[in-house]
Image (cartoon, rainbow, N blue to C red):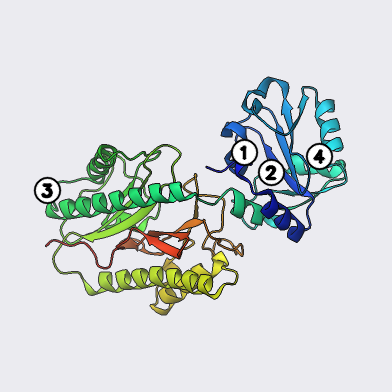
Amino acid sequence: MNGLATIDRAVMRETLERMGADGWLLFDFHGCNPVAQQILPGGAMATRRVFVWVPREGPITAIVHRIEMQPFSDFEGRIIPFSRHAELHAALRQTVGGKVAAMEISPRDAVPYLDRIPWGVIDLLHSLDVRTVPSDELVTRFAATWSMEEAAEHRRAAEIIRTIALEALAGANRRAGTGLSESALQREVITAMEQAGLFLDTHPIVGFGPNAANPHYEPRSGADRTLGHDEVVLLDLWGGVREGAIFADQTWMGFSGTDVPARVQEVWTAVRDARDAAVAKVVELAGAGGPVPGFEGDRAARQVIEAAGFGEFFVHRTGHSIDRDLHGSGPHLDDYETHDDRSLMPGTGCSVEPGVYLPGEFGVRSEVNLFWGPGGPEVTPGEPQRELVTIA
């Protein structure tokens, strides 16, 4: 688990020097900054403003409201309590006035997952002669990385989810034409996940036929579709072995027939190959020992789908960061919704999930996860989907 106590101050110092910053200024208020919640004591949502200054050298300083000091009871740095706004401003001026502070900001909102600090907070700091710079590399190194224990939990969840997905798709295919609804299959998947000991915070996506062409489709009982013969089936499911664990996030595809139409097979092949191309690009760049910008993975996937003639139907990024939030704050595989030039690093993880969505027909997405472990980037689950699950 990440936190102030786990930060390697030597690595922090080197990173801050490279960024031209005097320190990292963490801020949270009512959960607006999930990065701060990963790092700050207790990880609890603050109902009053809280600032923590992690300088290149010297003790860490926490500026905390007097009614919310309990999470800092074991804090080993300096604490400046405040109640009145004048006390807060004085504490900030004393602690960071005239300094360069790295914060969770992104110029022009280029990367929303990094852009967490309200404009008013930045305006306040500027009035105190504080210059702010993006904390992108700090976030990747100290908030978005997994421990080896978390990686092991993720792998365990990934294999459980793979088994559940394959069994669910095979079972659904056998019941084509019997009135099986998307909501019913969703309930069955949730039950299987819970019985396997997985923790869920939201429900999986189940889409039949044309509903699979809606990337974030939500089945609703009584208003959803029943599975017919010879239809595409999309199943997107995620979960962890406990609350707060690193989730596994996968999308699996089926077809409720024995003979896959040429058009469906063409789309599936393009999506699967795009997934593999993104993984190959990350592995290649990591092996070369240089930066591994997230946008490169997206470009590699998108080139495959565009070459197959489906580029206009690939309408989202290739992958999102995964940390203790399923959609984490680290680098994304994205050169579409954003141009994410942040580099993946050892210890980070992300999804790889290209998709093609043909309105009114069907949609196909294939999703695996990628974790940069001690041996380099590795795919979970260990055996990704190669072909559509059909009626045997």
**Residue 184 as seen in the image, left or right of residue 83:** left
C-alpha gap between disc 2 and disc 1 = 7 Å
In the image, residue 207 lies at what x, y percent?
A: 29, 52
Rendered position, 184 above or below 335? above
Q: Earlier in the sequence, mark 1 or mark 3?
A: 1
| Secondary structure under the numbered disc 2 in the rendered image | loop
Q: Earlier in the sequence, mark 2 or mark 1?
A: 1
- Label 3: how many residues lie within 10 Å, few (<14), some (14-19) or many (20+)? few
Q: Name the residue that disc number 2 marks.
A: 117
**Observer able to see residue 335:** no
In the image, residue 58 lies at what x, y percent?
A: 78, 43
Foreground disc of the pair 3, 2: 2
Amino acid residing under circle 1: Cys
Q: Determine contact: label 2, label 1, CB under 8 Å.
A: yes
Q: Earlier in the sequence, mark 1 or mark 4?
A: 1
Residue 32: image tag: 1
C-alpha gap between disc 3 and disc 2 = 52 Å
Q: Determine contact: label 3, label 4, CB under 8 Å.
A: no
Figure label count: 4
Q: Name the residue that disc number 4 marks.
A: 124
Residue 178: image tag: 3
- Label 1: how many residues lie within 10 Å, few (<14), some (14-19) or many (20+)? some
Q: Quick one: which residue is furthest to the bottom in this view?
A: 307
Determine the residue positioned at 72% across, 57% down. 14
